[in-house]
Amino acid sequence: MKTRYKRFFFPGCVFFVIFLSFLLRNHYYPAASLEITATCDKRIQAIVQWDTGDGFNDNETQDITLGNEAPLTDTTHTVKIERIGQRNNRAGGTDVLIVNVKTDKNKVVALSEVSSLAVVNLNSDGISKAFLLQRDGDFISFDADFSALEIVFLSGTFAGKAQVTVDDDQHVFDLYSPVNTFKPIVINKRFVPGQDVKTVTLPQLKIKGLLLHSIDLTHTFKLNSLEMVYSNGRTPLQFDQSKFSSSIGFGDIEQKKQLFHPVLVCIQLLLALLISWLSYELAGLKRRLALTDWRSVLTCVFVQQRLWIFWVFFLVSTGVFSLWLMAYWPGTMTNDSFDQWVQQKTLTFSNWHPYIYALGLAFLDQIFDSPASLAMFQLLSTAALGSCVFWFAIREGVRFYLVLPFFIAFVLSIPVGLYNISMWKDIPFSVLTSFFAFILFLLAYNKKAGRPVTPTWKAVSVTSVMFAALCLVRHNGIIFLFFLPLLLWILKLIPNRWVLRFSITSLILFVFIQYIVASALSVHSRTNYNLLNVTWKLGPILALFNSKLPYYSDNYEADAQMIQKYMSVEEIKDKYNYLNTAHIFFSKFSDGNVSYDGERLLNRFFIKRVADNMPMFFSERAFLIFSAFGYKYTSLWGNDLYKAPKDRDFIHPITARLNLSPRSMGLFNTLNDLVNRSSNYAGVFSARFWIWNPLIPLVAITTVFLLYKWLPITALSCLFVLFQVPFLFLTIQAPDFRYMYFIYLFAYMLFPLLLIELHSRKNHGGRDPL
């Protein structure tokens, strides 16, 4: 009995220390905003900055304008547009280019007649023009009758700040943008002296300091009050209210925090339990391996069965993959990533993207508060799986020199290196898909070799958790839920009683996570399933309306009336093409536009009209799926951390602290140049076509599957991967490489598995069916 207690003493101590560390170090900060009440005698362009640990910087900021406003009167106004010679830190110049100026009475100011403006052609035919204020201090002025004025500027990397003055009322606009784009500005308000109230949303993070200052420090204002506003109260910040100032700062912010947030505590508790269980397993290795000393344990773990090869492969692949993280620190993120990062920080989850991924981020964030924690987890998982497959091939007798080229290709793969550090749910989905394909191979291989596997409850429990994660981490993962147990049962790869136990355990976990936990976290109430269910059907629907040949329908008028709520048939024909369905979806079918009844009508139309017009449906689907195979319009990879927070499409103060910060600029420049060269499209002879093309792996996997009579074991693992492809064909929404990444990743492991089976056939003198 004492021995048993001793076994649990060490993991118990680990649990206590880890849980206490999480509890005291990581807190939940309720949503808060900063309410600013100020009196101004002129319009004040100001900035609010907050310090979350990196000091005050240009990223964690919010621009505000202090001053009351009233509508412009419909009279004659004097307008002055000036290049003031100012820019933000990201801009490469102070250029001000005006595209056009128009009043609400449709009067267009003739910029071409202003001699001081330089004409800039925006395209080769000279039809589209912009007009440049050539030097700092240059301006144009005019009088016009209006109550609203629209000025379209050209934003870009060399654009500075423009000052627009209407009747002595000054407005300053920052025209910088990481890409060239039109920036329309509408002025329909005038400044009114007096008291003004502005509210700035703050991040749900520990705030160490706040700073409010006017952009032009010669412009002062009288601050009446400054309060942190929460859902259940206010916390005033203390300062001298009698003075006019242009800048005021605060340290040691009295910020509300919740030490025992139930969701956060559950996450910390479960993670501490997981770490303590792992420590228990490690501490018990000597006993379970029936060895007398720890030196023998180390020999067993690192040397026997040529395991040293696995560890060399693992260290090499981890080291190479880590170079990508060092170059793109703290990882790569897009709008989807920002959304899920905000969810795990605010603990408000939705199922637009499967919430389990954001929940997983919350677990990793307890260890290291950075996207780099996820990048490290993903690259370690990929390195471990790949190294295991390559080591297994060598252990089973495949010559080292035959395996080595595939290992080198795996380690040096540009897509694998980049995707390891990308915050997308597609990466764990792809790793788990390849893992279970390998598990099927392993079970079938052992059965054929006369050593069938009989699982244990521990192995079944761990595998069930991983399988439930595979089914949940991407919406289309659900199709595996019954397919894998079916394969195990039909092929009798493990005893039927264990198939049943695995199936029931996995199903219970799936239901528990998808419904019970999700309901407790209010996931479903935050998810517009009406809209979500339309996403994959919209492309075929729009393709029918856009078809040059009329599609078959028994009531065209009813069809047009049904879609008219979102956009007219004429607008569809004008704007739709196969590649911009996502843009149309978010602009026309946005959240709140699709009701339950609207979803039913769209579903009814989809089912009936697609069934009546199958050639058009398959045409649209085929175009999308084949566009993902190395085509120039395929989306390969993205990183919005390149952009400053103000320039990102997804704006939230929590993400302002996330920025591209290479640990080595030399490494970043080298790898970034490699990425750019590999992704440039120049036909079938370009690197993009061969490096970023999942068609080649798909053909290889399909070929091996079709050779199932001669290669039944490898074909089985290929079947598991290929099972996803028909469903992807039906539901793909855009030509995006990441949707196909599971095919691409598995292809690196396919050839070692193939070599194992060929070596086995050679040694055993022929083919044995499963």
Image (tube, rainbow, N blue to C red):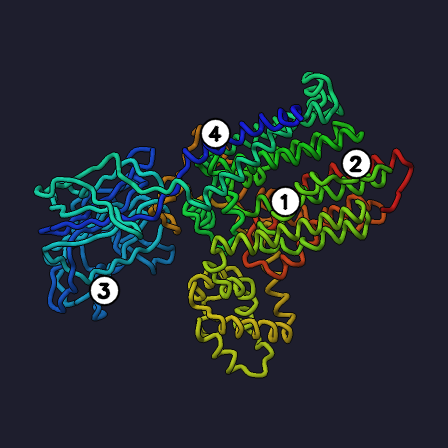
Q: Is residue 722 above or below residue 621?
A: above
CA separation in Å, label 4 and label 1: 38 Å
Q: Nearer the viewer, residue 364 or 312?
A: 364
Please state which amino acid type lies under the numbered disc 4.
Leu
Q: Specify which label sits upstream in the sequence, 1 or 3.
A: 3
Please state which amino acid type lies under the numbered disc 3.
Lys
Q: Nearer the viewer, mark 1 or mark 3?
A: 1
Q: Are marks 1 and 3 in contact (CB under 8 Å)?
A: no
Please state which amino acid type lies under the numbered disc 1.
Val
Callout 3 crowding tier (Cα within 10 Å): few <14, some 14–19, many ≥20: some
Instruction: Check disc 2 and report the residue beneath it.
Output: 756
Q: Nearer the viewer, residue 574 or 248?
A: 248
Q: Is residue 498 above or below residue 534?
A: above
Callout 1 crowding tier (Cα within 10 Å): few <14, some 14–19, many ≥20: some
Which corner quadrant holds the N terminus? top right
The x, y position of residue 199, in whole percent, is 25, 52
Work out whether residue 333 can be spotted: yes
Residue under the point 77% across and 44% down: 714
Q: Nearer the viewer, mark 4 or mark 2?
A: 2
CA separation in Å, label 4 and label 2: 37 Å
Q: Nearer the viewer, mark 4 or mark 3?
A: 4
Please state which amino acid type lies under the numbered disc 2.
Ile
Work out whether residue 669 can be spotted: no
